[in-house]
Image (cartoon, rainbow, N blue to C red):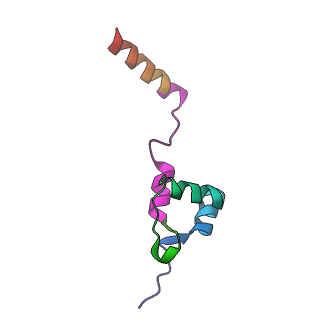
Amino acid sequence: MLQSKHKSFMTIEEASNYLGLKVSTLYMYVHRRVIPYYKPRRRVYFKIQDLDNFVLNENCRNKSESEIEIDALAHMEVTS
């Protein structure tokens, strides 16, 4: 079997460092099913692509002031 130079999975400790979160926070996210994870043989692993998608998820993104103003104007037009 060939060894890949590029890892596609991380342990919880590696994911913690990658995301800048405490290990306990990641365990809480796993318990609440907030973040995608894999759990073969009692160890928790995270796919790097899933971690990137979690960070870039539109639901987690804060809107800029101009985006909020545009949304507010659009809402006012609809309700008028």
Name the one closer to the observer, 12 or 78: 12
Q: Is residue 67 left or right of residue 13?
A: left
Q: Residue at x 44, y 22 (%)?
A: 70
Q: Is residue 80 left or right of residue 6?
A: left
Q: Where is the C terminus found, in terms of image quarters?
A: top left
Q: Is residue 25 left or right of residue 56?
A: right
Image spot of residue 9 (x, y percent): 49, 71
Q: Residue at x 35, y 12 (%)?
A: 79
- Picture layout, residue 71 above or below residue 28: above
Quarter of image, res 59: top left
Q: Where is the N terminus found, in terms of image quarters?
A: bottom left
- Picture layout, residue 5 above or below residue 2: above
Q: Residue at x 45, y 68 (%)?
A: 38
Image spot of residue 16 (x, y percent): 62, 62
Q: Which residue reaches farthest bottom?
A: 1
Q: Main secondary structure of the magenta part?
A: helix
- Picture layout, residue 23 above or below residue 63: below
Task: Report the span colored magenta.
Answer: 48-67
Name the one closer to the observer, 76 or 64: 76
Image spot of residue 62 (x, y percent): 53, 36
